Amino acid sequence: MTTAPPGLSTRIESMREYQQFAQFYDAVMGDGSSRSARILEAIGRCNVDATSLLELGCGTGSVLEGLVSIPRLVGLDASVEMLSFATTKVPSAEFVLGDMTDFNLGTTFDVVACVFDTVNHLVNYESWESMFKGVTRHLEPGGLFVFDLNTTGRLHQFVASPPWVHDFDGNTLIMDVRSDGDEVANWDIRVFAPAGDGMFTLHRENIRELGVALDTVRTTLATDFDLLHEEDDSGVPPTDESSRAHFVYRRRG
Ligand SMILES: C[S@@+](CC[C@H](N)C(=O)[O-])C[C@H]1O[C@@H](n2cnc3c(N)ncnc32)[C@H](O)[C@@H]1O
């Protein structure tokens, strides 16, 4: 059984994904400054006076770290291992161990963010719908929902690509993405870490992502939100073949 670090509100038991990868996450993924900058740009573009922000699936806190100009920051994540890095990285934020498909923080925010294909980690579409309802409940009327996703086309590309091998900090990472069917891509992640005397410890984990057609997502969100902006990585309107789709929605008043 995992326990939450001191100072962390606990809503669920930690989930199993990211238990192994958490310790290597920042070294492999780099910092989150470009993701923070995109959120700040959306807030500026939409003229929102953002005094509070909730990040769903905040991971190691790399995005929240770049948002500390916003007075009240809350990060929610299902992995106690990821949150243990976040609490150190962004001591001014509040962190909650919880499930973004089923959460009730008893408060609302000016902005809710969910970035770096975190929503894709929910591997059935009913969970996306539950998560979107949770966002509606936790947003002030007129508040912003900023999120991104890996498109179906991008996930197909990952599956078709050879494994990615990456050396970092004396470790070797092998990341192989295969199809689990039904638009689910499965990242088989192996990190070989030196254990002395020429031996290595293998840290292995599988992380799955669901691809969903952009129009399905747009239709779901149209009930409670107005679409303010959408773009792909190069700034043009996204399609199901884009690498990533970035969205900014406003909760209707
Ligand atoms: C790709 S990481 C992104 C972390 C962070 N947003 C960033 O940009 O660096 C995805 C995160 O989503 C979290 N996550 C996955 N499913 C979740 C769920 N159902 N509820 C809460 N967090 C979840 C994982 O633990 C992980 O930290």
Image: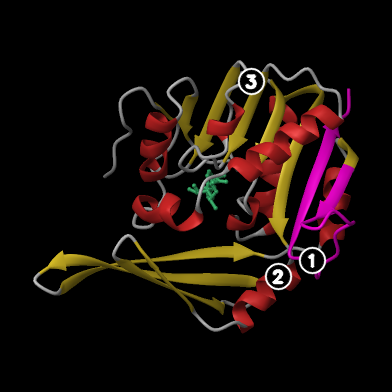
Please name the amino acid that badge 3 sits on.
Ile
**Numbered range of the magenta stretch:** 229-253
Task: Report which residue position mark 2 lands on.
Answer: 154
Give the residue displayed 85% in from the left and 31% down from the top: 45
Q: Quadrant of the C terminus?
A: top right
Element assignment for label 2: helix
Q: Earlier in the sequence, mark 1 or mark 2?
A: 2
Tags 1 and 2 touching, CB below 8 Å: yes
- Give whichever of 223, 163 is nearer the camera: 163
Taking the image as drawn, is residue 66 in sight?
Answer: yes
Q: Is residue 167 left or right of residue 103?
A: left
Q: Amino acid at mark 2?
A: Arg
User: Residue placed at 64% from the left, 60% from the top?
Assistant: 124
What's under tag 1, amino acid-wise? Ser
Residue that mark 1 sits on: 242
In contact (CB < 8 Å): disc 3 and disc 2: no
Q: Is residue 111 left or right of residue 88?
A: right
Residue 240 inside the magenta-drawn segment: yes
Q: Position of residue 21 (x, y in %)?
A: 38, 57
Seen in the picture, residue 7 relative to 123 is either above or below; the reply is above
Can you give x and y, in whole percent of width and height, for residue 207 in the image? Answer: 49, 63
Q: Position of residue 134 (x, y in %)?
A: 68, 35
Disc 1/disc 3 C-alpha distance (Å): 31 Å
Of callouts 3 and 2, which one flags the residue occurring earlier in the amino acid sequence?
3
Query: Residue 70 bears which disc, if any?
Result: 3
Against 247, is 178 above or below?
below
Helix, strand or loop at mark 3: loop
Place of residue 113 in the rendered image (x, y in percent of width and height, measured from the top left)? 67, 37
